[in-house]
Amino acid sequence: MSTEKLYYSDPYLKSFEAKILKIGVEDGENYIVLDQTAFYPEGGGQPWDTGKIKGENFEVEVYKVLEVGGEIRHYVKSVEDFSEGATVLGEINWERRILHMQHHTASHIVWGAIRRVVGDVKVAGSGIHADRARIEVFVGKGRKISHEQLEEIEWLANKIIWEDRKVKTYFLPFEEALRKFPELEVKKAVKEVRVVEIEDWDVNFCGGTHVARTGEVLAIRILRRERAGEGVDRLMITAGKTAIDMFWKERLDVENIRKMLNEKNVLKAVQNLLDSKNKLEEKVMSLEAEIQIEKLLGKAEQHGDLKILVTCVDIPKKSMEAVAKRAVQKYPNLVVLIGRVNGGAAVIGAAGEKAIDKGINIGDIINKVSKILGGGGGGQLNFAKGGGPRGDMLEEALENGKKLILEKIS
Ligand SMILES: [Zn+2]
């Protein structure tokens, strides 16, 4: 009592007539078995088909299809209108099925591309869905598929689609299949092996449903590559209408950006935006530095010709650097030594030209100050930075630095 698998003889069959062989129930779930079916049962990583089964005056939803102990079970909510021996009409959900066929064929195309680009790799796993397919590749410890390789794989896969190659499926006796394709793995001994062959590109043993020509896959996109385990890379891909929808959405996004920027060349417009943003940031930073300098100068002490500014500040480290550099540029007779506590302590020092003439080596001073902070640092005669974990020692360290400066100029 076995069901004829119409999805193998014609994967494009959307509706069919069949006779009910059996009505069954298991774990509270009703199912019917037909003498022939176009409903694909879950298997080989491909999900089951859904659809409807219709009779004279009724129809029921098929929500799950499984192959259990050699029988293909169509699971339905109710079997009260069915009787064994009656003829019914089956209709599969074609939108779902064609996406499975596109994604399944896409994964074979991508495998062919992976073998050509990455070399001798093994299948670690795979899965087909209506909107994506998962391909797991054993690449070996310490190896991964690079970004450039992914681009090449994607390009090659799409080239195979444009070339609209034939996809042949046929059965071979087990022994013959092994002889003919010794490089392919068969998990368990079966009477017959189903071969899926993409013309001059890829051969695989597979029991799923596929399109008849690669052109029907429409497009393939690699969504991402991720690590799936030691030495195993996982590629998520999308194909068919899902891929086209994605291109379409992105196309609309770009169109909207183009409108927002009022510029034909989007790339150029975004580059211009980034450039002007960077310039503005620099400008803001230097304006902020100017404001800080004037504020801090009130704390500077006059010693002879030189001004000495030693103090704690509460501005970001990046701003500290800008402030110190700009201050000594503006006032050549200035020596700056500023510090900031943030967990540990950071110190920045700068010396103007006249201060350097008087013998100030700010790199040397920062080095000594940083040691008090339990860390290190140094730099040039005119600019240096350092710090250490001892934030609590900052005031003492700065005081010490001031002493060193005064010693030099007295
Ligand atoms: Zn397949």
Image (cartoon, rainbow, N blue to C red):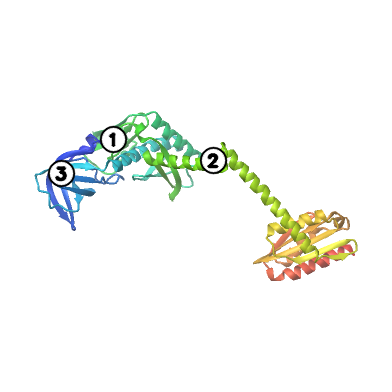
**Which amino acid type is shown beneath numbered disc 1?**
Val
Marking on residue 40: none
Point out the tag, 3 or 1, that comes first from the N-terminus: 3
- Residue labelled with disc 2: 258
Q: Is residue 41 left or right of residue 139?
A: left
132, 201: nearer the viewer = 132
**Which amino acid type is shown beneath numbered disc 3?**
Leu
**Residue 193 visible in image:** yes
**Residue 381 visible in image:** no
18, 35: nearer the viewer = 18
Measured as percent of width and height from the top left, residue 23 is found at 13, 50
Q: Nearer the viewer, mark 3 or mark 1?
A: 3
Residue 221 image-quadrant placement = top left
Point out the tag, 3 or 2, that comes first from the N-terminus: 3
- Residue labelled with disc 3: 34
Label 3: element kind: strand
Residue at (77%, 63%) from the top-left corner? 295
- Residue labelled with disc 1: 195
Q: Nearer the viewer, mark 3 or mark 2?
A: 2
Quadrant of the image containing the C terminus: bottom right
